[in-house]
Amino acid sequence: MDHGAPIVHDVFGISWLDFNLSNVMMIAIASLIVFILSVLGSRKLQMKPTGVQNFMEWILDFVKGMISDAMDWKQGKIFLPLALTLITYILVSNLLGVMTMGVFGHDLWWKSPTSDAGLTLTLAAMVIVLSHYYGIKSRGVKEYGKDFIRPFPLFFPIKVIEEFSNTLTLGLRLFGNIYAGEVLLTLLVGLTTSSFLGFLGGAIPMLAWQGFSVFIGTIQAFIFTMLSMVYISHKVSSDH
């Protein structure tokens, strides 16, 4: 992996503000793909769905089942758009780097957006913040705050640490799996392009790893979305 990243340093003259142009481009591409799929899946709705509409309705039913497993549907139905957006965006982002990896001028431009810890931790932090927001909204500040000192006030620092650990584990789990997959895929591509013997020895493992990466990317999208709904259900439901 002898490539770098197209990073713009000191944006607006701010010493700590840097932008990875590859991340910006791939985030925009992933968002555009999800938007196009959503438009195609809902543009001409039919009683007997076919094509993209059939695929989107299958995902919709699948996400409904995930929410119902995490919390009561009457309480959790408002989170359907969030869960649907998370699973489709993360799935598309995970698979972008499986198709190919584009290096231009010794800089890596085309990759999975979720192979960057900054994006995955941002998504995780967003989910945790939303869980607190909806917890306060549905139960009130006083009742919600009591959860941090139950069953004993001594548990308060442990509960605070738990919130930070949930954010880290949710984001780093996704990042670690996707990043490790792309590292190995890059090594296999290097092997297949090194020589004829390298091609013979690396072609089949590379294809096998690409197939496995599709499976891993799908599973990680499911795990992230499922855990997000579980974390939210713990905040909005008084039973937990």
Image (cartoon, helix red, strand yellow):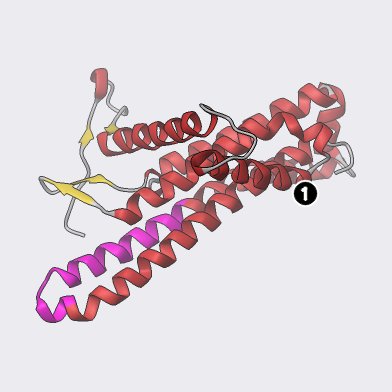
Specify start and end residues of the magenta stretch as a single range: 175-199
Closest to the observer, 163 or 187 = 187
Q: Is residue 98 shown left or right of residue 34? A: left
- Position of residue 65 measured from the top left corner of the image (x, y, whole percent): 73, 47
Callout 1: few (<14), some (14-19), or many (20+) C-alpha neighbours within 10 Å?
Answer: some
Whether 113 is drawn above or below 41: the answer is below
Q: Total number of numbered labels?
A: 1
Q: Amino acid at mark 1?
A: Asp
In the displayed structure, would residue 112 be above or below residue 77? below
- Give the residue number, with chain letter if any, for mark 1: 69
Residue 90 within the segment the image draws in magenta: no
Identify which residue, 127 or 62, lies in the foreground.
Answer: 62
Q: Does residue 139 sit above or below 168 in this rendering?
A: above
Eyeballing the image, is 201 above or below 168? below
The residue lying at 57 percent from left, 33 percent from top is 126
Residue furthest to the top: 12
Left or right of 188, for residue 31: right
